[in-house]
Image (cartoon, grey):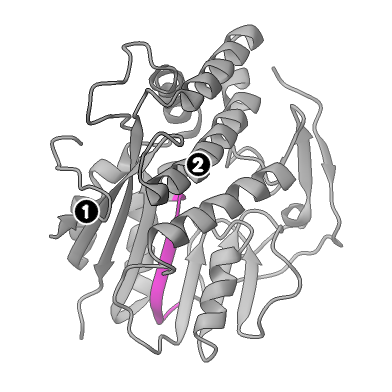
Amino acid sequence: MEEDGIIEPLEDDDLPEAAREVTSDYDPSEEETTFGSLTSSVNGHVWEYGRRYHAFRYGRYPIPNDEEEYKRESIRHTMLKDLLGGKLYLAPIGDSPQKIIDLGTGFGEWAIEVGETFPSAKVTGVDLSPIQPLWIPPNVEFIVDDIEDEWVHANDYDFAHFRFVNTLLKDNVAVLTRVFQNLKPGGWVEIQDVLPHVASDDNTIPPAYPLIKFYAMLKPVLRNKYGFDIRLMDRLPGLLQNVGFVNVQRKVFHMPLGEWARDPYLRLLGGYFREVMLDFVGAMASRPLVEAGYDREEIDDIVRDVHAAFANRRIHAYLPIHFVWAQKPPA
């Protein structure tokens, strides 16, 4: 199993209830999709704590789906493309994949660009929210559904893609097993996500670094309220092997938290990542930490402290982003 990185590799050892108003811009409908039978709630939205969330499977996913979140996803998409030198993935899927599925597609930028890259392929994006654009390439489709449901009609995919999704799933073993079952022999899966292990190479992180404190607050909330494991990427390669995948590969990138790097390329990536992480901290402060019972003043304090820490160029902190890909055994 390969473990190296363009920036720097990590070794394994480093390793109150609010009013709920449902609104929709779409006509409600009931239909059957790739994954199952949907209800009219799929096209609704819920406004809480000043942010908009999906109504389908209400509460399943704690991150908003509003314009602020669109900005975060767009910046993250640009950041990852720059990180990979313009690439959209690392798995060796070949030059002519015919069926691609983007699981947890969000606003759909990755799926659209992959569809443009492979005009002969059918690209399907799946998400809990109907937030994708209407004007899309003819070979791209979007489905509103829960990827943790049974896959009723899906099969024969060449490539399954996840981006910053798996650490916010309840049962990765079940989801990845379904991916395995619905890939063609020889097909690939790729998973990209952050491991929340804040580090530096020069010991410039103070003992009470705010992002470490923030993760200490957030981790039990996500585990106990939602059933998520935000340290999943630590053990993902072994999990994929247990499901049956082969040729499991991993690249780990140390992403600077802020513009502290001397190198212009790393400084650009750090600026992107600072904005992505600040918006993530804001999203988690808007709902999960409030519903977990944290005092509003305490939440505001930690958010303010994280902002200040990311602006301090004397602190050379980074987070690892893992890219893991694996193959279903060829026939």
Residue under circle 2? 271
Could you say which is closer to the camera, residue 273 or residue 260? 260
- Image x and y of residue 232, in percent: 32, 42
| Span of residues in magenta | 155-165
Residue at image x 45%, y 18%?
217
Residue at image x 31%, y 73%?
188
Residue under circle 1? 237
Q: Quadrant of residue 275?
A: top right
Could you say which is closer to the camera, residue 181 or residue 100? 100
- Image x and y of residue 121, in percent: 50, 87
> In the figure, is residue 326 to the left or right of 34?
left
The residue type indicated by label 1 comes to: Pro
- Image x and y of residue 165, in percent: 46, 50
Q: Earlier in the sequence, mark 2 or mark 1?
A: 1
The residue type indicated by label 2 comes to: Gly
> In the figure, is residue 300 to the left or right of 14?
right
How far apart marks 2 and 1 lie (CA) works out to 29 Å
Magenta: main secondary structure equals strand
Foreground: disc 2 or disc 1:
2
For mark 1, does the 10 Å Cα neighbourhood hold few (<14), some (14 to 19), or many (20 or more) residues?
Answer: many
Disc ID at residue 57: none
The quadrant of the picture occupied by the C terminus is bottom left
Could you say which is closer to the camera, residue 185 or residue 95? 95
> In the figure, is residue 93 to the left or right of 292?
left
Q: Quadrant of residue 233?
A: top left
Answer whether residue 196 is visible to the viewer in this image. Answer: no
| SS assignment at label 1 | helix
